[in-house]
Amino acid sequence: MGLSTHVLDTMHGCPAAGMEVALYSTHGDAATLLQRLVLNHDGRTDAPLFDNASVRAGTYRLRFDVAGYFKAKGVTLPEPNFLNQVSLDFGIAHEDQHYHVPLLVSPWSYSTYRGS
């Protein structure tokens, strides 16, 4: 597993099933969409974003549709939303290592780290 993600909904205490996520490669301010996906029942992707053979060193962005997810769950959000899209820019330096990018999120806060 070269690159993976997992999103937990801290407002409801459950995986963020159904959240839309986009993966981009980045170079400076330019971003190229690599894939869009929807998280499964466990708040994860069905397959790694990159497997061991396709992971490459470089800079990337994961963009999570936080407002869309919470609206779909029936949460009343103010207009404009405090959090709409959460973008995490990160780098992959070692192609032989696994990079896991989890997101803990509510309509008003988020946290991330490099997981295992």
Image: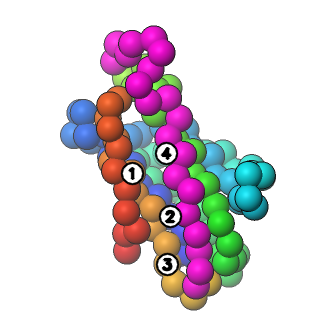
Percent position (x, y) of residue 58?
68, 72
Residue 49 seen in this snapshot? yes
How far is mark 3 from mark 4, CA to CA?
Answer: 19 Å
Q: Amino acid at mark 3?
A: His
Magenta residues, as a range?
A: 75-94
User: From the viewer's perspective, is the residue at label 1 or at label 4 nearer?
Assistant: 1
Determine contact: label 2, label 4, CB under 8 Å: no
Image-based side of 37 in relation to 13, left or right: right
How far is mark 1 from mark 4, CA to CA?
Answer: 12 Å
Residue bearing mark 1: 103
Residue bearing mark 4: 39
User: From the viewer's perspective, is the residue at label 2 or at label 1 nearer?
Assistant: 1
User: From the viewer's perspective, is the residue at label 3 or at label 4 nearer?
Assistant: 3
Q: Earlier in the sequence, mark 1 or mark 4?
A: 4
- Relative to 9, does residue 101 appear above or below in the rendering? below
Q: Residue 16's mark? A: none
Q: Amino acid at mark 1?
A: Leu
Determine contact: label 1, label 3, CB under 8 Å: no
How far is mark 2 from mark 3, CA to CA?
Answer: 8 Å
Q: Amino acid at mark 4?
A: Leu
Residue bearing mark 2: 4
Determine contact: label 2, label 3, CB under 8 Å: yes
Percent position (x, y) of residue 73?
37, 23
How far is mark 1 from mark 3, CA to CA?
Answer: 16 Å
Q: Earlier in the sequence, mark 2 or mark 3?
A: 2
